């Protein structure tokens, strides 16, 4: 029975089980040895995926976390080899991280108010006013932290209904710069 090591089964089963048990007992050196043994496989497994807003190192880190979870929860008495068990844990953890990143992609939109549906609110009702204000504050907070000074100025003028040409004149920039700023704003706030 092969329990750990590379996919070639290079690691001795008893040594492998000892490393896993030592790591489960809190031995940092054993844990480091397992991670070193698994690094080439972790790189291969994580390279198959893409995470929104992340890079290869982020995926590799998620793969390491999946491996750590596999080490913590592995029970050799269940008769399951560690290799397929760990691969499943790594895969599941990476998929969870990808889904989390995907959910965060639209966070600003999830907190925003559709301008068409804003008409459904009664501006005489204090509760409706409070809800609109909360949504507006969340959108503005996102904008404040994500946008450059130029992008904030362009957005404010654009929201006033001012044309690209007039925005460019007021800010003493080209119309193309206004257009580019609005494209960046859309990508940052979506």
Image (spheres, rainbow, N blue to C red):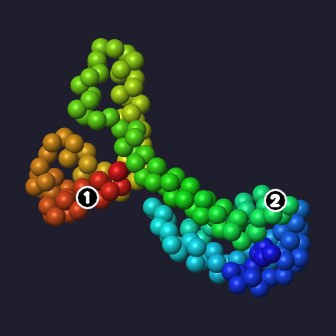
Residue at point 81%, 59% (across, down):
78
In the image shown, does 164 or 28 lie closer to the viewer?
28
The picture places residue 154, in percent across and down from the top left corner, at 24, 52
Front position in the image: 148 or 76: 76
Residue at 64% in and 63% down? 88
- Work out how far the residue at label 2 is from the one at label 1, CA to CA, in angstroms: 55 Å
Q: Indicate whether 26 appears above or below 10.
A: above
Along the line of sight, which residue is nearer the eye, 119 or 48? Answer: 48
Other-residue count near label 1 (Cα within 10 Å), few / some / many at <14 / 14–19 / ≥20: few
- Name the front one of labels 2 and 1: 2
- Which residue is disc 2 drawn over? 78
Q: Residue at x 16, y 64 (%)?
A: 176
Instruction: Determine which quarter of the picture holds residue 140.
Output: top left
Q: Quadrant of residue 30?
A: bottom right
Residue 124 at x, y = what percent?
A: 30, 14
Q: Mark 1 highlights which residue?
A: 183
**Residue 79 falls in which quadrant of the image?**
bottom right
In the rendered image, residue 136, in percent from the top left (x then y), is placed at 36, 35
Q: Mark 1 or mark 2, which is nearer the start of the sequence?
A: 2
Q: Is residue 56 above or below residue 138?
A: below
């Amino acid at each position: 029975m092969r329990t750990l090591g590379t996919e070639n089964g290079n690691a001795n089963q008893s040594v492998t089980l000892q490393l896993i048990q030592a790591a489960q007992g809190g031995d940092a050196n054993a844990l480091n040895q397992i991670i070193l043994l698994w690094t080439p496989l972790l790189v291969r497994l994580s390279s198959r995926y893409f995470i929104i807003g992340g890079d290869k190192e982020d995926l590799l880190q998620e793969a390491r976390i999946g491996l750590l979870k596999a080490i913590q929860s592995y029970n050799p008495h269940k008769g399951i080899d560690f290799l397929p068990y760990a691969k499943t844990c790594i895969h599941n953890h990476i998929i969870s991280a990808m889904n989390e990143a995907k959910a965060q992609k639209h966070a600003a939109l999830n907190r925003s108010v559709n301008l068409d549906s804003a008409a459904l609110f009664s501006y005489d009702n204090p509760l409706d006013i409070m809800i609109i204000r909360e949504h507006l504050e969340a959108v503005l907070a996102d904008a404040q932290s994500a946008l450059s000074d130029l992008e904030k100025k362009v957005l404010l003028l654009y929201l006033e209904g001012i044309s690209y040409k007039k925005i460019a004149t007021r800010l003493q920039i080209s119309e193309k710069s206004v257009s580019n700023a609005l494209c960046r704003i859309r990508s940052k706030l979506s």
